[in-house]
Amino acid sequence: MNQERTLYEKVREDILNGTFDKKEKLTEIKLAKMYDVSRTPIREVLKQLEFEYLVKDGYVYTPSPEDYRNLFEMRILIESHAVEKAVLLFVEEDLKELRNYIKQAKDGDDSLTLAANKKFHDKLVRAIRNPFLSETYDRLNSTIYLFSRTVVQKQRPELLDEHEKIVQAIEDRDGETARQLIVTHLQKDLEFTLYYM
Amino acid sequence: MNQERTLYEKVREDILNGTFDKKEKLTEIKLAKMYDVSRTPIREVLKQLEFEYLVKDGYVYTPSPEDYRNLFEMRILIESHAVEKAVLLFVEEDLKELRNYIKQAKDGDDSLTLAANKKFHDKLVRAIRNPFLSETYDRLNSTIYLFSRTVVQKQRPELLDEHEKIVQAIEDRDGETARQLIVTHLQKDLEFTLYYM
DNA sequence: AAAGTGTTAAATGTATACATTTTTAATATT
DNA sequence: AATATTAAAAATGTATACATTTAACACTTT
């Protein structure tokens, strides 16, 4: 197995794990020394991290609640579009896959639950079958990760129930209900997490 | 007035004006010589142009009809969300501004019409009041420009009528109609332009 | 003390040299 | 002729030097 992490992955993980204080400027020179590379690849990585809302103006991005609401508006727009597509396109096997992720989330530890929940939402988004929208969704990965970590660690109630109900609505081919359910599901994630931050 | 164009603007305009053949590789070295700068700023510019779907894998991006449909799915998702917001938020002055753009598009030459139509759609998107979604929409600027240029030059019928009806639906606070109208409006733009390409 | 001024330090922007990878195309092999 | 092989060339990736801009801070002046 290839364990080698790219520079991008290393910096990203360090940011997500809180290596850098939010008041600490991420200068190219300092990062270059830290990761033992030159400024050139560091610049590329910083651009990529800005792209996914992890870095802004040379600092770790600490979005305001308003910013998080806006990022979630974007997420909700994409995922609600996704479930409407899923209602039209998903076959029995797709639904089985979704239910499998719910089961994994129920049975595993926090780390597995986190991974399974991510797979659940990613599977929904893939229903759109649109690489441009998928990539736009992926830009939110770090934000979604930070929220999902809180939601799992602080054990937000009803979470897996809501996943179940969404799958059921898709199976029933009830697009309007499915849409409503995913919207309120994500809004609850948002409000729950903002409460803890 | 500051007439100085940035390197990014120069390269972008040259691509939009057809300076580069689609079979022509945009190598950093060649571009650096062409624009009399070093490879470093050229790399930045190429990244930016990839971001907005004008360059891909070192060539001018020539999307397939399928790609264009997907890009427009993204556009439609954002703009239909925008009109729903506009129905809730726009006041008389905003509607006046929209109608003003329709008038400008009617009276001016192609170049003015193009600019006015862009302002119309940008005004709608700003109703979302979400910088992340606005930026996502702006990524589509070049694609939208290419389509809008065809639509105006080839004089797609009904275009300004459709704009009128959208404004009317917003004024009537009829979100569902407004949404339907913008969706079909954009789908017509898409199909009309694909026919000519 | 607050507000300006100038000097220094440190950061980013740009150019360029060098390392590595990829592409090209000429030649050999089946 | 099509397929490998491989040497040369050309591209990108990375490091680094230099230029320019921005930030920090000591010192005046009010």
Image (tube, coloured by chain):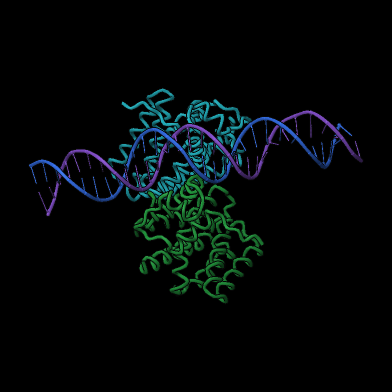
Chain colours: A cyan, B green, C blue, D purple
Q: Residue furthest bottom?
A: B107
Q: Inspect this view and state whether residue A21 appears.
A: yes
The answer to which image quadrant residue A134 occupies is top left
Q: Is residue B125 above or below residue A54?
A: below
Picture mark count: 0
Is B1 on the left-hand or right-hand side of A15? right
For the point 46% across and 73% down, which residue is it? B153
- Please state, as top left, top right, bottom left or bottom right, where the C terminus of chain B lies in the image: bottom left
**Quick one: A69 or B116, which is closer to the camera?**
B116
**Quick one: A178 or B129, which is closer to the camera?**
B129
* Position in image of residue B159 (x %, y %): 48, 71
For the point 38% across and 35% down, which residue is it? A119
* Position in image of residue A67 (x %, y %): 59, 42
**Quick one: B136 or B110, which is closer to the camera?**
B110
For the point 47% across and 51% down, which residue is it? B32
- Please state, as top left, top right, bottom left or bottom right, where the N terminus of chain B lies in the image: bottom right
* Position in image of residue A2 (x %, y %): 33, 27
For the point 49% across and 50% down, which residue is it? B45
Q: Is residue A10 above or below residue B127?
A: above
* Position in image of residue B22 (x %, y %): 36, 59
Q: Inspect this view and state whether residue A174 appears.
A: no
Q: Is residue B136 above or below residue B172?
A: above
